[in-house]
Image: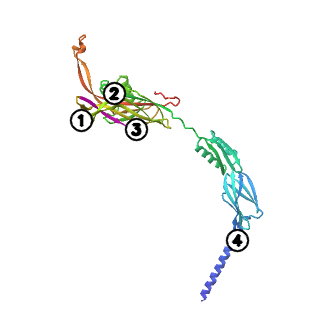
């Protein structure tokens, strides 16, 4: 029993010491609170509507009230600095452009709110715009704490960039910059030179020249971009110098970028079409080269060329006979490609070989040397030859010319 009374007495003493310690700490903290910034005695009751205050950078302004200020709240101390002058006055100093808020309380617990709008001098904004957007005509006008942008701009991105820069100097920007609607540029003319060639492998062999491209297979059209120099260019120049190239046709296509153009060379021939188990009928079939081209100019200066060639070759191996008449058949090559050509480059289509029988005339010893009658004595030899058919399309683009010329 005696021990229990001692315990109760001990707890009472500890509780009293705890209350005294808490009261002393609270008083010490209250003593450390700066004069004029203590919590209002009546507590926070309400917040009045915000008052807008506009300032310029480095400007000083004093706010005063008919009561003593007990507490102040500043939302962003990097924009504004507050210095108490008296218990009822505060000095405001604008540090940099932006928007912040100040709350002030008195003893009655009513909070007064101030929206502080800080802007930079308009001359600093004008200097930056003149340096960064020298080619743009922008007019600045200050309206209280706002800036209004006026003028004409060609690109929407530039318009947005100017507004973004202005917001670094003024918290409120009125953007009256007008976009100039640019006229659509007229498509530039393009001229394309197509050249269709045949080349005999037998002639190449006699002149110790070799076809530089992969072995062509029937029905497998291929393409390659030709430069002014390189193995293929040197071969074509050597074959041209020895008169081995036979140009079949050289159509010129004049168009504008973005517009499809086409050319066609060759003719029509009778073709046997199956009409029954033992019979056939004849209809006309186009042979030769038909090609569609779609040029488009790219931003990097290249010419993008969409090409759709269709080549119909006469093929004697597919000959058909009606009564006593034998008609050859048609071999068709088709391709569809998209290629980018730089200046000086051209497109080469190949892979359309044809087999032919060539008769070569040879003189007979002694008899061919007889005067007058010698030309009547000769022998002919049949030679199997492979003929390469290839097409070269060379574009030319000259923006200054009405119609570009082919180099």
Residue 294 - label? none
Q: What element carries label 1?
A: loop
**Residue that sits furthest to the bottom in the current view:** 1
Residue 323 placement: quadrant: top left
Residue sitting at 72 percent across and 70 percent down? 42
Q: Is mark 2 on a helix, strand or loop?
A: strand
**Residue mark closest to the camera, 4 vs 3:** 3
First of labels 1, 4 by sequence position: 4
> Distance of mark 2 from mark 3, alpha carbons?
24 Å
Crowd band around label 1 with a 10 angstrom C-alpha radius: few (<14), some (14–19), many (20+): few
Range drawn in magenta: 325-337
Expressed as whole percent of the image width and height from the top left, the position of residue 45 reads 69, 68
Q: What element carries label 3?
A: strand
> Distance of mark 2 from mark 1, alpha carbons?
38 Å
Location of mark 3 (residue): 337
**Residue mark closest to the camera, 2 vs 1:** 1
First of labels 4, 3 by sequence position: 4
Crowd band around label 2 with a 10 angstrom C-alpha radius: few (<14), some (14–19), many (20+): some
Mark 3 touches mark 1? (CB < 8 Å)? no
> Distance of mark 1 from mark 4, alpha carbons?
122 Å
First of labels 3, 1 by sequence position: 1
Expressed as whole percent of the image width and height from the top left, the position of residue 371 reads 24, 10
Expressed as whole percent of the image width and height from the top left, the position of residue 130 reads 65, 41
Location of mark 1 (residue): 279
**Residue mark closest to the camera, 3 vs 1:** 1
């Amino acid at each position: 029993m005696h021990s229990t009374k001692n315990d109760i007495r001990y707890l009472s003493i500890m509780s009293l010491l705890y209350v005294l310690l808490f009261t002393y700490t609270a008083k010490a903290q209250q003593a450390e609170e700066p004069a004029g910034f203590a919590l209002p005695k009546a507590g926070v009751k309400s917040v009045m509507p915000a008052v807008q205050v506009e300032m310029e950078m480095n400007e000083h302004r004093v706010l005063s009230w008919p009561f003593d200020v007990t507490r102040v709240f500043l939302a962003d101390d990097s924009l504004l600095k507050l210095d108490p002058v008296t218990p009822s006055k505060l000095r405001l100093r604008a540090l940099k452009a932006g928007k912040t808020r100040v709350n002030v309380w008195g003893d009655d617990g009513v909070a007064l709110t101030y929206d502080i709008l800080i802007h930079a001098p308009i001359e600093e904004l004008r200097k930056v715009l003149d340096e960064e957007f020298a080619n743009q005509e922008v007019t600045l006008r200050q309206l209280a704490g706002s800036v209004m942008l006026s003028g004409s701009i060609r690109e929407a991105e530039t318009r947005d960039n100017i507004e973004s820069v202005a917001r670094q100097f003024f918290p409120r920007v009125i953007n009256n910059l007008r976009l100039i609607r640019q006229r659509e540029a007229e498509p530039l003319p393009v001229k394309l030179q197509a050249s269709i060639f045949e080349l005999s492998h037998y002639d190449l062999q006699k002149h110790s020249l070799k076809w530089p491209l992969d072995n062509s297979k029937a029905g497998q059209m291929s393409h390659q971009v030709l430069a002014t120099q390189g193995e293929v260019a040197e071969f074509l120049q050597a074959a041209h110098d020895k008169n081995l190239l036979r140009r079949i046709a050289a159509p010129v296509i004049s168009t504008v970028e973005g517009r499809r153009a086409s050319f066609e060379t060759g003719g029509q021939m009778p073709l046997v079409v199956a009409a029954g188990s033992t019979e056939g009928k004849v209809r006309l079939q186009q042979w030769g080269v038909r090609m569609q081209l779609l040029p488009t100019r790219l931003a990097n200066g290249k010419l993008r060329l969409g090409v759709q060639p269709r080549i119909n070759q006469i093929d004697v191996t597919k000959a058909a006979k009606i009564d006593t008449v034998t008609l050859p058949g048609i071999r068709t090559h088709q391709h569809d490609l998209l290629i980018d050509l730089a200046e000086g480059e051209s497109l080469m289509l190949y892979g359309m070989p044809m087999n032919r029988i060539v008769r070569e005339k040879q003189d007979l010893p002694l008899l061919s040397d007889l005067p007058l009658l010698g030309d009547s004595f000769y022998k002919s030899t049949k030679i199997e030859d492979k003929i390469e058919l290839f097409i070269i399309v060379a574009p030319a683009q000259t923006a200054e010319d009405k119609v570009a010329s082919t180099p």
